Amino acid sequence: MSIGSKAPLPCKFSSDDWCVLNCDVVVGLKDREFGEVWVELDGERRSEYPRSFTKVNMVYHVEGDVPEKLVRRTIKKSHEKYCSVSNSLSREIEIAWELILHDK
C-alpha cells in the first residue's frame, strides 16, 4: 500500500519522513553539495479494525556526491534518537528504510 493520501495515518508517516529528511539529513549535509532529497513511503496495515500500520518502508533518495556512510548514519540516528515523530510511533510498527544515492 502506498502511503500518499492526506488521511491521518499517512500524514503521520509523512511527518516522520519530513522530520528525518529535512531536520536531520539536510542539516547533516549542510557543508556538502547535494541536489534534491526525497522519500518514498509504503506500508502494510492490519486486515481487521483498527487497521493500524504494522510495517512502514521508507526509501530515502539523495542526489549528489555525498558520503554514503554519513547519510546512512544520519538516517539511522534520526530514527533511533532525534526524530520525535519516529519515536512517538508504536514499537509494534516495524520501520524499515533504505537509501538510494543518485548522481547529480
Image (cartoon, rainbow, N blue to C red):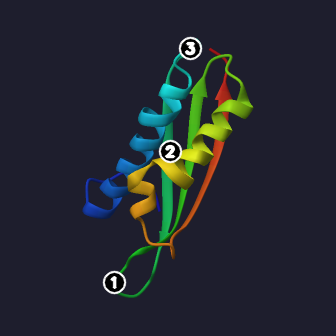
Q: How many marks?
A: 3
State the residue at coordinates (39%, 76%): 52
Kindly give the residue lying farthest to the bottom in the view shown. 48
At mark 1, the secondary structure is: loop
Q: Residues within 10 Å of mark 1 (few under 14, many from 20)?
A: few
- According to the picture, the residue beneath numbered tag 1 turns out to be 50
- Alpha carbon distance from label 3 to label 1: 44 Å
Q: What's the residue type where badge 3 is placed?
A: Asp
Tell me if residue 11 comes above or below residue 91 in the rendering. Answer: above
Where residue 89 appears, as percent x and y from the top left, is 42, 66
Tell me if residue 101 comes above or below residue 14 in the rendering. Answer: above
- According to the picture, the residue beneath numbered tag 2 turns out to be 40
Q: Quadrant of the C terminus?
A: top right
Residue 99 vs residue 74, the one in the foreground: 74
Tell me if residue 31 comes above or below residue 5 in the rendering. Answer: above
In this view of the protein, can residue 104 be seen by the observer?
yes
The dot on residue 31 is 3
Query: On the rendered structure, is 27 left or right of 34?
Result: left
Circle nearer the viewer, 2 or 3: 3
Where residue 80 appears, as percent x and y from the top left, is 56, 54
Q: What's the residue type where badge 1 is placed?
A: Pro
